[in-house]
Image (cartoon, helix red, strand yellow):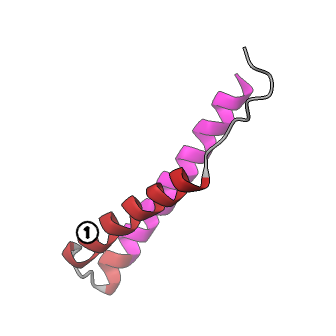
Amino acid sequence: MNRNASTGFTLVELAVVLLILSVTIAILLPRLPRLTGTEQSSALRRLVLTAEASHEEAAVKKKA
């Protein structure tokens, strides 16, 4: 095994990922439904709960 080999991503790889994400968001964003205040609040609440559950799951996996 070569000990001098660096690990990580190159600048080109990161740029390609950002480009793919940008194009995907640009395509999907206009297609998202326009939510009313109550629907938006409910969707935001679900998003926060999902993020919290993911965070707790990652913490449990890290301890294991």
Report the quarter where the C terminus lies: top right
Up/down of 25 relative to 55, above or below: below
Q: Is residue 17 or residue 53 the one in the foreground?
A: 17
Asked if residue 46 lies left or right of residue 48, the reply is: left
Asked if residue 38 lies left or right of residue 51, the reply is: left
Determine the residue positioned at 41% across, 64% down.
19
Determine the residue positioned at 23% across, 78% down.
30
How many numbered discs? 1
Determine the residue positioned at 73% across, 30% down.
5
Based on the displayed image, in which of its 4 quarters is residue 25 positioned? bottom left
Asked if residue 63 lies left or right of residue 11, the reply is: right
Determine the residue positioned at 19% across, 74% down.
31
- SS at circle 1: helix
Report the quarter where the N terminus lies: top right
Stretch in magenta: 41-64
Mark 1 crowdedness (10 Å alpha carbons): few <14, some 14-19, many ≥20: few
Up/down of 1 relative to 53, above or below: above
Q: Where is residue 59 in the image (x, y as percent from the top left)?
A: 68, 37
Q: Where is residue 34 in the image (x, y as percent from the top left)?
A: 24, 82
Up/down of 41 relative to 43, above or below: below
Query: Is residue 34 a member of the stretch shown in magenta?
Result: no
Query: Is residue 50 a member of the stretch shown in magenta?
Result: yes
Residue for badge 1: 28
